[in-house]
Amino acid sequence: MRDDNSFQLHIDYFNFEYKIQQQLEVYLFENIRLLKKSGVVNNILNNADTININIHIYFFTGLCNITAQLLARSPDATARILSIGQFDDFQNLLSCVQTGSYGCISATNMLEEIIPAILSVLQKKIYISPCFASYINTYFTRNNDNYLHLF
């Protein structure tokens, strides 16, 4: 049996209003057990002595600076990025993923989606909010699937 110290999750927050960040931090604190008890964490721990993950969560009120802001992230190149915002079309989602984000989370469903998004990060998969699924489906229905491997 492993102790809780085998799983180390370091989260940094960027561009958040204080109240929203505090709400997210409290939610994660209260629900961290969902991550620790997940099959994903257990599978990873079976192959490693410890999990030490750095996650940077960005909150975007607009989409115009998403590329510049993500590219100017902290000097920790090993950190995995999650982006929270209102992505209004496929191109916004694509730019989010292409700039290095491991997830695009709906701002309106932030609390409900943060745990599944972190689980995806742990699996080195990209998380896309179910709210944005219609954008992806519409794009791939109308166009070639040049970016399908990203999703």
Image: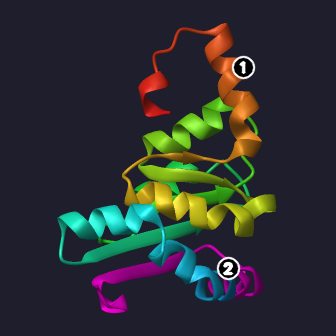
Q: Left of 75 or right of it: where is 107? A: right
Instruction: Kindly identify which residue carries mark 1.
Output: 138
Q: In terms of image quadrants, where is residue 134? A: top right
* Distance between the alpha carbons at the discs numbered 2 and 1: 31 Å
The amino acid at mark 2 is Leu
Q: Which circle's residue, 2 or 1, is located before the other in the chain? A: 2
Q: Which residue is at the far right? A: 108
> Regarding mark 1 in the picture, which secondary structure is present there?
helix
Relative to 56, say whether 86 is above or below: above
5 magenta-colored: yes
Instruction: Kindly identify which residue carries mark 2.
Output: 24
Pinpoint residue 128: horizontal percent, then vertical percent.
60, 45
Residue at (75, 51) in percent of width and height = 86
The quarter of the rendered structure image containing the N terminus is bottom left
Residue at (68, 82) in percent of width and height = 27
Give neighbour class at mark 1: few <14, some 14-19, many 20+ (Cα, 10 Å).
few
Relative to 64, say whether 6 is above or below: below
Pinpoint residue 56: horizontal percent, then vertical percent.
46, 70
Residue at (67, 88) in percent of width and height = 26
- Can residue 94 be seen in this snapshot? yes
User: In the rendering, which numbered label is found on residue 90?
Assistant: none
Residues rendered magenta in the picture? 1-25
Towards the viewer: 68 or 25: 25
